[in-house]
Amino acid sequence: MGTILRDLLCFIPELTLGGLILIFLGGAVFLKKETQGSVLFGKVMFGVLGMVGILVLLQNLEPLYIFNRLFISDTYTIFVKVLVLSITICIYSFSFSSLKSEKVIGVELYVFILMALLGMFMVIGSNDFLSFYLGMELQNIAFYVLVSFKKDSLKNNEAAIKYFILGVVASGIFLFGASLLYGAVGSLNFQDIGNVLGASTLESSSGIPYALFGAGVGLLFIMVSFLFKVSIVPFHMWAPDVYEGSPLPIVAFLAFAPKVVILSVILRLWALLFSETTVFVASSVLKVFPPMIMGASLLSIIVGTFGAFGQSNIKRFLAYTGISHMGFVVLGISLGNYSGMHAALVYLLSYIIMGIGFFASLGALRYPPGFSRIGIVKDLSDLKGLSKTHPGMSFSLAILMISFAGLPPLIGFFSKLYLLLSLIETGFVGIAILGGLSSVVAAVYYLRIVKDLYFEDAEVSLEVVTPLSFFIPLFLSLGGTVFFCIYAEPVLLYVSILMKMLLGR
Amino acid sequence: MDIFDGFPLLSLLIFLPFFGAVFVFLIPQTPGKTEKNIKNTALFIAGCTFMFSLLIWGQFDPSLGSYQFVENKEWLPGLNIRYSLGIDGISLFFVLLTTSLIPLCILGSWESIKHQQKEFLIFLLVLETFILGAFCVLDLLLFYIFFEGTLIPMFLIIGIWGGERRIYAAFKFFFYTLTGSIFMFIAILFLYFKTGTTSIPDLALYPFESSLQVWLWLAFFASFAIKLPMFPFHTWLPEAHVEAPTVGSMILAGILLKMGGYGFLRISLPFFPEASYRFAPYVCGLSIIGIVYASLVALVQRDIKKLIAYSSIAHMGFVTLGIFTFQREGLNGSILQMLSHGVLSSGLFLCVGILYERVHSRDIEAYGGIVSFMPLFSVFFMSLILGAIGLPGTAGFVGEFLVILGTFQVSPLMVVGAGFGIILSAVYMLGLYRKVVFGPVEKIRFQKLKDLSMREGSLLFFFVGCMFWMGLYPNSFIGALHQPISKILEYYGRQQDALVPIFKMKNSIVFNEREL
């Protein structure tokens, strides 16, 4: 009885989220007008998200296994949960009015955001492929609905169907891999898998043991579905189309939150199975994984970088740059040592910090009334000449672009610095040079945006909407981008503590 | 020095323009009303920075061999990368060059920048911060950050206020420099991985293996040679100069190019003496080719700005030639050449800007006989041109003479090439002057030309004054350069025994440095 109570206490944020989903659904029935309800719920959401945040922060920092080791709760999970929650709050805060302008507001929206959040919390806390799958499916289903929210748009429907079919296929691949893994190892628990694999390598030193081989194939399938979720080449095809078709705030949500979640699990698994401290990797079939993942990440850096070149649509552009940035993160993870994983997490954080600002400022830019297009700005060329009408907004966009390009002294530079340093430390000087050169190529199109902002004359005089909800995320993001070089200490120290904990050092 | 002990003088110097830029940013902009305020504020800040640098010069002790005004603070946790600043004689003069040029640039842009003046001044002040930072830091990574940081403001200055092909020029400038710098960046990371530190004074003492030195030297060379620019990597410079606004050209020629030469002196030579030694013949050869080639190209230019840009490349050839002789005279000469070129070329670009504002053409053919209408201007222009040719008594002479003196001890053959370059420089510079200032007045509109205004006149007077000061009393600079140059030469003393002389030109030489 005592343990169940303790487990439930540790699960309070998730339970609260579940309860709130029910309350929202139930409340929607009793509201008279849908618009009235959506506005009311929209405001309540801030309080709800804040409350969940407090509940997460109140959790015990000691590592604890919950529900018969299905879930885990430690500093790392709390960190990632807080991170995901802050992403959600930032994006929600500026998406509230953007969604109104895209006419996709409704009570369901909040329910599905909360549902996605619940799913993500479960994935972050999972310590077992079973609980992982349950969480991931909950999150996926919520996202399928969120992506298809603009019911009357053809592009949106196309995007939703693509995302749904490919997502389901990825889930199927995951399940197949998990069943193979279960057959080979006899458990789906992360620690058990690590232990069994380690023991079976020691037992049979000659030849490839059966269990290891089955586990290897199973893990391969699981990895594929993971890479699909973080849109790593060659599983990246869905991203540009889905991004293009979905409303911008949903894209912002989709671009960060699920990726952070899956990457956090990849980091945990990688530290457990493929890090330099795990002896069995080098002597088994599993040793093909790190170079394979590294190759995929390099490919996605290259494909993302060159793919973004020809894009004129902002969302497609963001999808391709996202692919290349995710490539850098996974490249760091694939090194499997402390410095690589530290660099990967720093890179991810910096990408989030810059990206939220970029999405927030894009969300504030609207076509003027009477123009042939309506709503949020859609093409990169529409940004031309913004500096003449809105100097402040174009200045912040330019700073973010320069930071994305990885130029000092902004945060994008430091994330690349740590990553290249870890590559060189591990002995991959050639790959470091490749990464550096690809960031030069990437700088071309980031600076092309700066050029459009400053050097060209305006074709459309865009409007900037100015509620506070846009500017708070934007200022936070700009502050992080600019002042990281001066005061990076707390972030870096915290990340290094987390990584040392994951690697058991 | 006593009262300033422990006081972060250099940090203040570096970040004063930055805070000024923030302050300018906060001045609300109403067209037609606040522009004057904005300009005055920016000028005041730049002037304060200049005063501040003079204070530092006053406190500087040239007899000390070590870095002065040193600051050293924890910066990136986990990595042994520190926020450390300090200057020696070499950096001191580049700092002074920067702080003195920026107020002049602001004055120079007083009327020529017609739109978005506020942004222009902000970029200029931010640029000053980055340049000063690059000259003052004692940490490689910080150096890289400041070195690269200059790209963005300069990119924007060229791109927003430039001429017709400004976008092409801005991108060319940016990507040439960035590509070179990426190799330097990787090399810095590699150095850090190898030695566990990025401190410049510590790394200078670290003995690198010779095979490693070659690669690292090449990586740094890629960056500095493009920045300087050296002969095969120079193609971005004429474009950038032609399209940049007058003030952009002044900064580009006056200061930014010097960062390449400074990099050679501060990083390539002390860190990799063996590789520098090995590559020196090639670098000197390229320098000679660059001098002659750029001079020949300058001869046939129709565009005044392009002509001066090519003359800059030729002058920078002298700089690399002087550095890679590893002689005291050569090193002294190359530093003085950089300083004098900083004054002369920015003065010349200012002259071109003054002409352009009146005639709206950079084509040499469009001019002629302006001496009758702008006598005062013609006098200043003449003095600067004589300086650029290297007439004795002007700044240009000291640098070129010392470089040639240094080169002569290494290889008399090279002196022939360099001398040829000097003769050519007289031909194209005086040709330019003849075509622009003298000759018949064919264009009626020239009759309306006004001579220099008070602002322009005093600006040019300052440039000419500086030029004669450096030419007539170079000792005020050479004194403080003695210690740092001795330090650089020391690294070569260590190399001498281990290496077979590589310069095997005429009299199988070489490097018989007197101090050693």
Image (tube, rainbow, N blue to C red):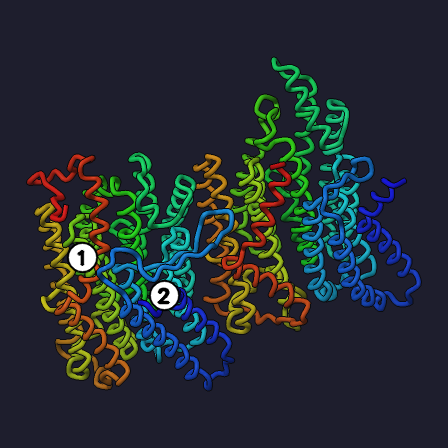
Q: Is residue A345 left or right of residue A119?
A: left
Task: Tell me where residue B143 appears, x and y as whole percent.
Answer: 38, 55
Q: Residue at x 61, y 22 (%)?
A: A285
Label 1 neighbour load within 10 Å: few <14, some 14-19, many 20+: many
Depth check, front residue: B85 or A433: B85
Task: Tell me where residue B106 appears, x and y as whole percent.
Answer: 35, 75
Task: Tell me where residue B23 appears, x and y as whole percent.
Answer: 47, 75
Dot 2 falls on a residue whose secondary structure is loop
Task: Tell me where residue B135 appears, x and y as whole percent.
Answer: 33, 60
Label 2 neighbour load within 10 Å: few <14, some 14-19, many 20+: few
Q: Chain of mark 2?
A: B
User: Where is mark 1, residue-wise?
Assistant: B332
Amino acid at the residue labelled 2: Asp
Q: Residue at x 42, y 42 (%)?
A: B196
Dot 1 falls on a residue whose secondary structure is helix
Q: Quarter of the image holding residue A434?
A: top left
Choose mark 2 or mark 1, whichever is in front.
2
User: Where is mark 2, residue-wise?
Assistant: B5
Q: Is residue B439 left or right of residue B341?
A: left
Q: Is residue B505 left or right of residue A173?
A: left
Q: Is residue B448 left or right of residue B511?
A: right
Discs 2, 1 touching: Cβ within 8 Å: no
Amino acid at the residue labelled 1: Asn
Q: Chain of mark 1?
A: B
**Rendered-image quadrant of the C terminus of chain A:** top right
- Label 2, label 1: how far apart the Cα atoms are: 30 Å
Q: Quarter of the image holding residue B380?
A: bottom left
> What is the residue that sits farthest to the left in this orientation?
B507
